[in-house]
Amino acid sequence: MASDPQAHSQAHPLRLSVDIGGTFTDLVVEEGGLLRLFKAPTVPSDPVQGILDVIGVAAAAEGVGAGDFLARVASLAHATTRGLNAVLTGTAARTALLVTSGHPDVLLLREGGRRDPYDFTVPYPEPYVPRRLTLELPGRILSTGEELEPLDLAAVEAACDRLLELDVEAVAVCLLWATVNPAHELAVGEVLARRLGGIPFSLSHALNPSLREYRRASSTAIDASLKPLMSDYVAALTGRLREAGLAGRILMVTSMGGVVEVEDAAAAPIVTLNSGPSMAPVAGRAYAAADTGSDAVIIADAGGTTFDVTLVRRGEIPSTRTAWVGEEGTGHLTGLPSIDVKSAGAGGGSIAWVDSGGLLHVGPQSAGSQPGPACYGRGGTAATVTDAALVLGYLDAEHFSSGRMRLDVEAARRAIEHDVAVPLGLGLVEAASAVLDLTTEQMVHAIEEITLQQGIDPSAAVLVGGGGAAGLNAAAVAGRLGSPSLVMPAVGAALAAAGALMSDYTAVYSSTIPALTSAFDAERVNAGLAELLARGRAFAERMGGGAASIGLYAEARYPQQIWELEIPLRGERFAGADDVAGFVADFHDVHEEILGIRDDGSPVEVVSWGARVRVPLERAEGVLSARLESGTVATSRTAYVRGAGMVEVPVRPLSSLTPGLAERGPILIESPFTTIVVADASSVEIAPSGSLVITPAARTAGATPLPDLEESLR
Amino acid sequence: MTERSTAPANDGAQLAVLSHRLEAIVRRMANTLARSGRSGVLNTARDFSCCILTADGEVLTTGQSLPIHVMGGPDLQAEALREFFPVMRRGDAFLHNSPYHGNTHAADHAIMVPVVDRDGVHRFTVVAKAHQADCGNSVPTTYMASARDVYEEGALVFPVVRVQQDYADLDDILRMCEMRIRVPEQWRGDYLAIMGSARIGERALLELGEEVGWDVLDGFSRDWLDYSERRMEVTIRALPAGSTTKSTVHDPFPGVPDGVPIQATVTVLPEEGMIEVDLRDNPDCVPSGLNLSQATSRAAAFIGLFNSIDHTIPHNQGSFRRVRVLLRENCVVGIPRHPVSCSVATTNLSNRVGNLVQRAMAELGAGLGMAEVGTGMSPAEAVVSGIDRRAGATAFVNQIFTGTNGGAAGPHTDGWLTMDDLGSGGTLLLDSVEIDELKQPIVIHERRLAVDTEGAGHRRGAPGTIVEYGPIGGPIEAIYANDGSINPMAGARGGRAGAPSRQQKRTRDGSLVALDICGPEVIEVGERLVARTSGGGGYGDPATREPELVLADVREGWISERRAREVYLVQIRDGRIDQDATGQLRSAKEMWRNRG
């Protein structure tokens, strides 16, 4: 226990969140609603050691031993990119795939398609499981669930012999129509359990009961391939944390923006695959609500090489079923619902260049952190976004990255002059400004792509900026989108880690019961919904949560459409025709909101039904605010303001701003992890949570209304 | 136009920003179309396109649209629009599917919307075009190979017909369609989707014009096309000068019992910065649905050419200025005259023409061009129709996309497995077996790549695919229009041809019988259609392919050990490369060549 008994008596239980990044392992400690951030180097060969190290740093800051510190911890939430990296680098387990006879190429053929019709430099993607590890099993179920051909059990036994011979470490089973009738998959599972001596396997109908065999097979193959690795990791993690003195719960962040117990993550490791970017929107939602009261939010998390965009729509974080691991189109579809994230390669290291026709480009090449931008002085000579920002006076050459680094202004000027200004025939400052403008445009592009998919009007949503590189463009991006306000939370770079402290236990259950509203089999649907509710309640009970909420939804479409929309259900069952009519009306509305048109005369087809369960973790009330070190004094420096050129602009440390007192731009706000550039007359104010809230000077002129456009499309 | 010439010039930075804005608008249009469409051909396969034209009708921004839709036709469609409707009014929308007025073929329904600003000035035209599941043909297919003319084809043809005025449907036209097009609800849903897409493009352009100013956008259009032309010119000036003629033959078809022999002459003129494609020395139009429309003749030539060079050059009227495509009236790959049928204009001969051009480019210099992409619409891509008796008795008609033709090898990569054809650029999606079995009363018994069917080469073509399917509960009719069964797809620069395609029926006793290259074919319960799609051609000598890549193909079951030895001259023993034997095989060949 804590060495100072007085401090201890006042202490709240601690909640921790750990995020293992490529360079640093971040730890956020929450105590009584206040957050503190700690960092320690990541240990790539032993990530658990990195976690123990950063816990040691936090304990030392408290002046206690790690054991005493950990004894006060109620829960530790943990996001890891371990599974994701294994999939991306092809270092997951040697996995076999068992499929329906006649269809060995389900992972090879994928769903067809190619991104750029004229680009023949990209090779055809490899299947996640090679053909030589794919085995066919005779037996066939039809779309109705009827058995066309019985499962050949002798062939399953023979397949087991072959699997042992092939020395596989995991097995995925995905048979056609197993979602409608799982009898064959279950029978295969029984044989595998008996014959393979503990080699882990995944069955598609149990993991991902959804239509479309490629996606289901891909989920199943990825899941199986991660089982050996993740169960080892979870065993090491829990073992060593318990040994170090942790008594509280150990949780893992999921791709759906929730947390689960580590044991559940080990049983279905694919649920944690995209845990990296899934927490930023959880935090963004909380800060946007606290600082502006808005429930429509765009979260832009900008690092050195990546730019991740996520959303909040009516207070909910929308999910997608088309999440890719790796490049869209040539990577692998996870096939499972995941928080919708759009990533663009527009970071500070992106290289600016001019092509043979005289057109400016930013990226896709990046100088990364090695050699990095020209101004880092590490041998890079190419002009980057960071160099442009330095030329424009937006970065402090003497105190970059909280004084950890000095930047070479001359090198940045040389690079921008040579690579951009001369080829474009522009002045140095104009050229640097053009680079930032184009970067802004590319970020807007990424944002529009996802808002479009999810039917959100960006000019009605609050923009939340996080990550080390967010400050350079965030205000410009907000201006371009016409955002009502921009929020830069004080947790900044640790937005994701903070989000893990605001999340809930979540689980999603789904069930394939096709239904048509014009011939609605309420009895069958209600039975299915009752079963989903029962599963949800069982989960809630297991998590020990009293205040669990279970949201039922349908995945529905107009007949013959192929992409479903998620429609929340108004109640727990369909009591009569009115309930069905209400559901149909809801569908028309959502279809119009997302796709711009509605077909009132058409019935609605439901493909599957789902339940989303949320069990709140015990936590402090209200939003979490960050504790900031008091900053240095206000200064000024020469920086670029559009229309005025290079002029003297005030520079203020974030911590020196007075809550409730608005400042007017142009102004540069320095926080420990980023510089927030406000290069026009926008107003800037600090919120009680510690966030910086920026109201753009001139919101772009709104949409030109067309006479009854929606009306005319009906 | 004087108004244009006074517009402010854009520097390379402003140009980049605005081009992104226009690309985003096209993407938005495409997203709406894909997600709200009803027919499988639209929403599953994504057989559609969206583009923005200048007020003068120049193709400005095409996004990632289907190449055959946008590479050589929308400007012709805009010309027809201007001719019939000289005054553009806000709120109008036009349906255009006439292959005699710039459209691809009658099954592609295009909606054209003029973008007119608040002062009544016509600024842009947006075009959204989607292939229909049915277009009112005399038989249930949108690719009617046997049509001797447009009357027998029977499609409803709309040569720029106004379907909306003041943003309201002109219902009389739509009622006509509903009387004639099979599965009218599905068509009506697709119509809504196409119209929604065009209107979303219109609204976005109006907002952009208000935001940045119309004169700035005019200046952008001019400068963007000039930029694209400059990129093209720089590229062509660096190519080797030369002229090559390549020929090929489309397989025999209804109305053309000896097939259709065609040729293309490609001439690169680096000093002029121009490329010329001459398609005039070819047969007259034929009494078959095979004839190309003017749009597809041009598009096919452009596609073959742009596949052969730097893919980052924008594909618009600016870069097109540097290409002369010479066409002749009443030519099977030229400019058809009504009432010739162009029912199959987007696939079969288009693919042959594009292939000739990219193969010709390959001969002009190492590192250029490509081999030939697989061809034809096999039974794996048939339009299937019948009565679905699984719940009641409902008529259905839809094109399925269950198996694709193999892609061509090029200087950099092996062929793309799901390429299918040049017109789609490989962008069409492949159906899910489960989705197909849900939508139609069929069972897909097999779908796998066909071993040893790739065109061998230093870079190899992609193999064909085998697809076997049959009906449940009642017979189905399958209409297809294959090619490549007799004349397979050629390789380039010493690469070998891909294996020919094949269509068969598995009868109730399990035996296979050969089928005609064109449907319709009625398949009874207990019978199955068996398709093997065509393999893509190889690029470069297969005896120069890296032995490790040959070994990988053997291990993954793409080619047999025997083929590795006989064609690639790589000896594989116990799963490893036998270096000595491989060396001997390859040097023996080298000796032969030196002697010869």
Image (cartoon, coloured by chain):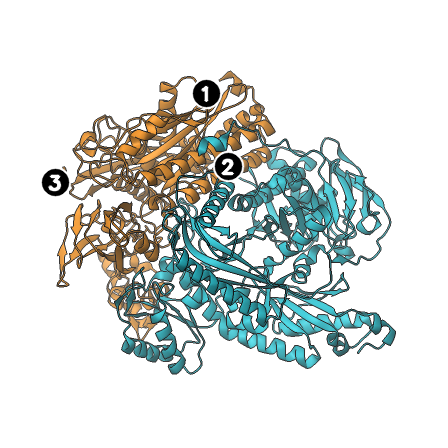
> Rounded to the nearest whole Å, what is the CA distance between mark 2 and mark 3?
47 Å
In the picture, the disc for residue A705 is: none
Instruction: Determine the residue positioned at 73% across, 60% down.
Output: A621
Q: Are marks 1 and 2 in contact (CB under 8 Å)?
A: no
The amino acid marked with disc number 3 is Pro
Q: Quadrant of the C terminus of chain A?
A: top left
1 or 2: mark nearer the eye: 1
Q: Please name the amino acid that badge 2 sits on.
A: Ile
The one of A417 and B270 positioned closer to us in this rendering: A417
State whether discs 1 and 3 lie on one chain: yes
Chain identifier of the residue bearing label 2 in the image: B
- Which chain did the renderer colour cyan? A
User: Mark 2 or mark 3, which is nearer to you?
Assistant: 2
Tag nearer the camera, 1 or 3: 1
* Marked residue nearer the N-terminal end (1 or 2): 2
Assess whether mark 3 and mark 2 are in contact (beta carbons under 8 angstroms): no
Rendering coords of residue A203 (x, y %): 41, 70
Quarter occupied by residue A276? bottom right
Residue A513, compared with residue A238, is above or below; it is above
* Local crowd size for mark 2, using a 10 Å CA cut-off: few (<14), some (14–19), many (≥20): many
Between discs 1 and 3, the one toward the N terminus: 1
Give the image location of residue A192, x and y in percent.
38, 78
Amino acid type, residue under disc 1 in the picture: Arg
Query: Mark 2 vs mark 3: same chain?
Result: yes
Point out which mark residue B89 bears.
1
**Colour chosen for chain B:** orange
Q: Residues within 10 Å of mark 1 (few under 14, many from 20)?
A: some
* Residue B263 placement (x, y as % from top left): 23, 37
Numbered label attached to residue B25:
2
Chain letter of disc 1? B
Question: In this picture, is B54 found above or below A308?
Answer: above
